[in-house]
Amino acid sequence: MRKFYLLTFALVFAFYANAQFSGDFAPANWTLTGTSAASDASVDTTNAPTSITFNGNDSDFGDCCGLQDDYTVTVPSDGLISFTYDFVNPDIEEFYYVINGTQSLITVNTETGTVSDITVSSGDTFAFRIYTDDDCCGRGIATISNFSFSNTLGTNDNNLLSNTVKLYPGTTNGTYNLEYNGNTNLDSFSVYNITGKLIKVISLKDIETTSIIDLTSLSTGVYLVNITSTEGVITKKIVL
């Protein structure tokens, strides 16, 4: 029998969408770029998904000043990134993480540490960066492990909106009835699987009081849905 449960509206619902370098964050989805055309920077993914090793530029080509190499991925949805790093600095290297071009220093020292709960949004570009002022005299090496992405849903749950929305199973398997008696327009009905991947988005802009939500194209399983309007967002859990 299908059931659905209303999540506690004040709760921030977070769950791991990707553990380590897998899924949306598998090495195949990252891109290595550098400011020097002669850069010999590389990323060793032999130990993925457990860890990757980012080797900075040490080409000794003669380029100078402000050189950097980035290992970049596109963030699939709103969430938090955490990781452990082991950085080796033999010369004048610096290690950063970068969001949409804005860099944040992790370390300039040879050290091991952890960075937790970096806030990112859907569509952001996230990168690890090794910066060096030259391309010689030893390369910076960053080994990154315990990489995790936790997807956050329902952070703006609104009690007023929750009191005006009802969602319950329809008469046909795979459908739900949505009833709304609020004063503002609904916007969207977004469906996520249990790994945090966005599966389906249904526009609610044209509904007035009732709508049949057709989810018959989805496989049997547990899903989270975000229902949004100008009043905020509520999160519900459904089982198909």
Image: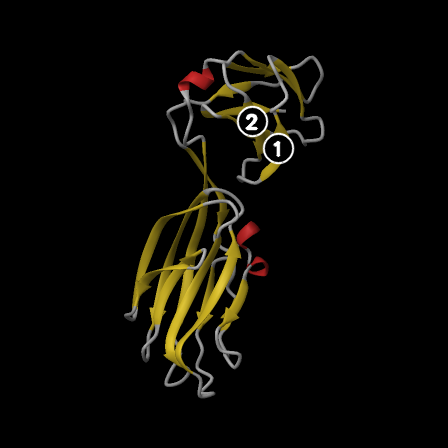
Per the image, label 1 sits on a secondary structure element best described as strand
Q: CA distance from mark 2 to mark 1?
A: 10 Å
Say which mark, if any, is on residue 129.
none
Specify the quadrant that holds the C terminus: top right
Residue at 59 percent across and 24 percent down: it is 239
Type of amino acid at the residue the image marks with label 1: Val
Return the x and y of residue 183 as percentages of the image width and height: 49, 14
Per the image, label 2 sits on a secondary structure element best described as strand
Give the number of the mark in front: 2 or 1: 2
Residue at 32 percent across and 62 percent down: it is 105
Return the x and y of residue 235 as percentages of the image width and height: 49, 26
- Give whichever of discs 2 and 1 has the lower sequence position: 2
Assess disc 1: are there few (<14), some (14-19) or many (≥20) residues with their C-alpha within 10 Å of its C-alpha: some
Assess disc 2: are there few (<14), some (14-19) or many (≥20) residues with their C-alpha within 10 Å of its C-alpha: some
Say which mark, if any, is on residue 201.
1
Residue at 39 percent across and 31 percent down: it is 12
Report how many numbered discs are placed on residues in the image: 2
Residue at 43 percent across and 74 percent down: it is 56
Return the x and y of residue 16 as percentages of the image width and height: 47, 42
Left or right of residue 220: residue 44: left
Asked if residue 175 is positioned above or below residue 34 in the image, the reply reads above
Please state which of residues 27 and 95 is positioned toward the viewer in this rendering.
Answer: 95
Please state which of residues 163 and 153 is positioned toward the viewer in this rendering.
Answer: 163
Return the x and y of residue 104 as percentages of the image width and height: 34, 59
Type of amino acid at the residue the image marks with label 2: Asp
**Residue behind mark 2:** 187
Left or right of residue 174: residue 72: left
Specify the quadrant that holds the N terminus: top right
